[in-house]
Image (spheres, grey):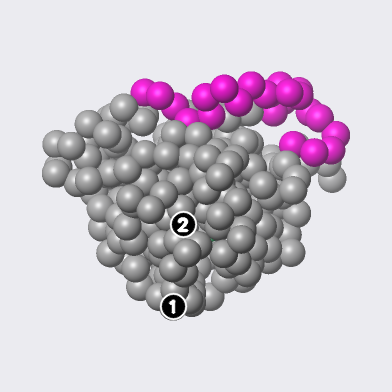
Amino acid sequence: MNIIEQIEQTAEFLRGKGITAPEVGVVLGTGLNALAERMEVEVSVSYSEIPNFVPATVAQHKGRLLYGTIAGRKVLLMQGRMHAYEGHTFQQITFPIRVMKWLGIKTLLLSNAAGALNLSYKKGEIMLLNDHINLLGSSPLVGKHLDEFGDRFPDMSQPYSADLCDKIKQIAQSKGIAIHEGVYVAVLGPQLETRAEYRFLRMIGADAVGMSTVPEVIVGHQMGLRCAAISALTDECDPDNLQSVNIEEIVAVAARADVLLAEIYSQLIALC
Ligand code: HPA
């Protein structure tokens, strides 16, 4: 089966489960689940049941696809994502985004847990992505090109929708939520960075670092989806004063930012 046949097979399976008219796609990152709790869920399917999906292996990820209503809109929500560091290919981890597009979404909202490289950004705060740097070492678009997906050489001058970014900032302001803005750099992981690596990532102009999101945005943008992404800043990456962190702490701090993110995204969905 080629990839288009796989996408159609998966889309057909999900339509059969009742996922018929999603408008907005959402991907929730590590430790981030508050938006899912605000959803009136109609359909819930485990990734392991979905043909051609690879299961999410990260313990902090639920690995379920939810379909239902948030703020009056039909939303298809990934409760946990796949990462390249789990050993999946970039094509596998972005496959769900292609399926969501096939099912009809027009807008893709993503979230992630990330380390704060910009030292005026603090853990527990959130950052709107206005650009990214791909240091994953590859691209989900490597390989045979299919015109159905869009351009072979997609423009990346503005992968994050300026309109969605403006709306996010307005919503945050109206709710009194402080939101930073900046450049997200994606690295493969799964190990966190050394002091020398954090120093390097700061020098090249990144404000936050994480292990996801960029592949999904590349694929979503290639297919013409309007994309936006917000990071929950979970640790402070000061190379000259680096505190050791572990994934449990990262998840605990993400929980603090989680409600802010859910507050903003639910209002944004109403405007989509
Ligand atoms: N580095 C990479 N990924 C991360 C970090 C970090 O410091 N924090 C949360 N995800």
The numbered mark at residue 248 is 1
Q: Main secondary structure of the magenta part?
A: loop
Residue 109 location, quadrant: top left
Earlier residue among tags 1 and 2: 2
Residue 51, percent from left and from top: 68, 56
Residue 41, percent from left and from top: 35, 56
Residue 253 location, quadrant: bottom left
Kind of residue at disc 1 = Glu
Q: Which residue is mark 2?
A: 114
| Residue 21 relative to residue 262: left or right | right
In the rendered view, would you say 228 is above or below 82?
A: above
Helix, strand or loop at label 2? It is strand
Kind of residue at disc 2 = Ala
Is residue 111 one of those drawn in magenta? no
Q: Is mark 2 within 8 Å of ligand 1?
A: yes
Magenta residues, start to end: 141-163
Helix, strand or loop at label 1? It is helix
